[in-house]
Image (spheres, coloured by chain):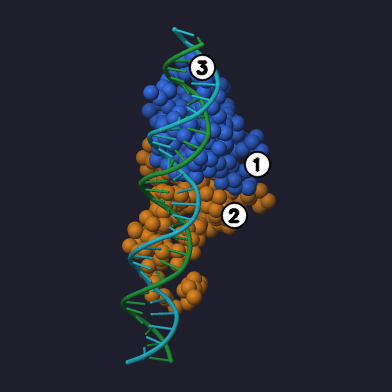
Chain colours: A blue, B orange, C cyan, D green
Amino acid sequence: MQPTDTAPGGRPRRSDATRAAILDAARERFASDGYERATIRAIARDAGIDPSMVMRYYGNKEGLFAAASEFDLRLPDLAAVPREEAGAVLVGHFLERWEEDGALTALLRVGVTNPAGAERMRAVFQEQVAPAVAAVCPDPDRAGVRAALVASQILGMAVSRYVLRFPPAAGMPRAEAVAWLAPTVQRYLTAGSP
Amino acid sequence: MQPTDTAPGGRPRRSDATRAAILDAARERFASDGYERATIRAIARDAGIDPSMVMRYYGNKEGLFAAASEFDLRLPDLAAVPREEAGAVLVGHFLERWEEDGALTALLRVGVTNPAGAERMRAVFQEQVAPAVAAVCPDPDRAGVRAALVASQILGMAVSRYVLRFPPAAGMPRAEAVAWLAPTVQRYLTAGSP
DNA sequence: GGGGGACGCCAACGGCCGTTGGCCTAGACT
DNA sequence: AGTCTAGGCCAACGGCCGTTGGCGTCCCCC
């Protein structure tokens, strides 16, 4: 019988360090290379173990990606900040989060190329972004549209700045990016329909 | 000697139909599958010819992509429209262009995963988007930043709507998307720095 | 009407990939 | 102390890929 991949409620396993090393390497490779070019062999080499270990612990490449791209945006509760600062808080949080966690770039890169990755991004959008937006928007039945608009602006800046690296976007200080984007997001969040 | 891949100034070649079929199939495959999963074999099958023909005419896969992703955004002259409508015109043009030409999605998909694709997107940005934006922005020395902001919003909507297909973004009528995005882009184009 | 080049297909090569199964080892539990 | 199992490596398989070279064939031009 294979070692069960039980929930982390159980006792620590002897292989936990290896599992973590694999996940770290996988996130980095997926982020920099995308799904297809991030090979299991390269990930295993980075983690200092044999490729077959990856298969044993995560089943197959798809399972590895699913595990590596599981993460929490840790979105702030927008209802708890002054209403007119929600846009700035949200943009600042996202850019900060993006710079500290390679999994976000990994998910974006894979989501654009791979159907399973796209599905996971839709899930993150629906389960994390949409509810956070709904907490402050004036018309709850249109919260989905507002959330999509917010996502479009933030994703677009992430693509321009961290993935395609358009020089003006990549070179802009984060504070300047926040200052430009905040009014946009604020309008998407709270302003009346155009 | 191989058939020369001379500029299209020369006489029409007997193989022009084949070349065009290859390019059409390539654009479609690159758009839907991305660079790595779009195989030369599949493209050749779609075009109804042998894979070796692709190599003969385009050298290698990278050359094929370069040829398939050569295109013109056909951006309007923003100086010729009323100043306060520039944002709406630009957004409307982009979304329309995106829906009619698969090469845009292809370039986006490949640009996110492939270094050569990213380089080509940077070139398109610098040679086509930046000059068009510079024609209306009040501070020409900061035109690059404004162009990057415009690109971030439009790219983000394209990603959300055409690639990741977030339901609210994909289902939104184009006119509604334009109405929401136009003020944002207008501000990036002409408003004072925040 | 004959020759030569453009056009097209076929078959194959080498390489890398995901994945599998067997074997050894060392630690944990009784 | 002895056993048993999880942890780890090694070697290999089958498949698909990009790419190459050779061989017919048809069209164009002299």
* Mark 1 burial class by Cα count in 10 Å: few <14, some 14-19, many 20+: some
What's the distance in space between the residues labelled 3 and 1, CA to CA?
44 Å
Viewer-side residue, A28 vs D11: D11
Pointers 3 and 2 in contact (CB under 8 A)? Answer: no
Quadrant location of residue A101?
top right
Residue B40 falls in which quadrant of the image? bottom left
Three-letter code, disc 1: Met
C-alpha distance separating marks 3 and 2: 53 Å
Hey, what amino acid is under mark 2? Answer: Gln
Q: CA distance from mark 1 to mark 2?
A: 16 Å
Work out whether A9 lies above or below C9: above
The chain under label 2 reads B
Element type where label 2 sits in the image: helix
Dot 1 falls on a residue whose secondary structure is: loop
- Would you name the residue on which mark 3 appears? A12
Q: Residue at x 54, y 47 (%)?
A: B151
Residue identifier under label 1? A172
Residue A21 lies, in percent from the top left, at 55, 29
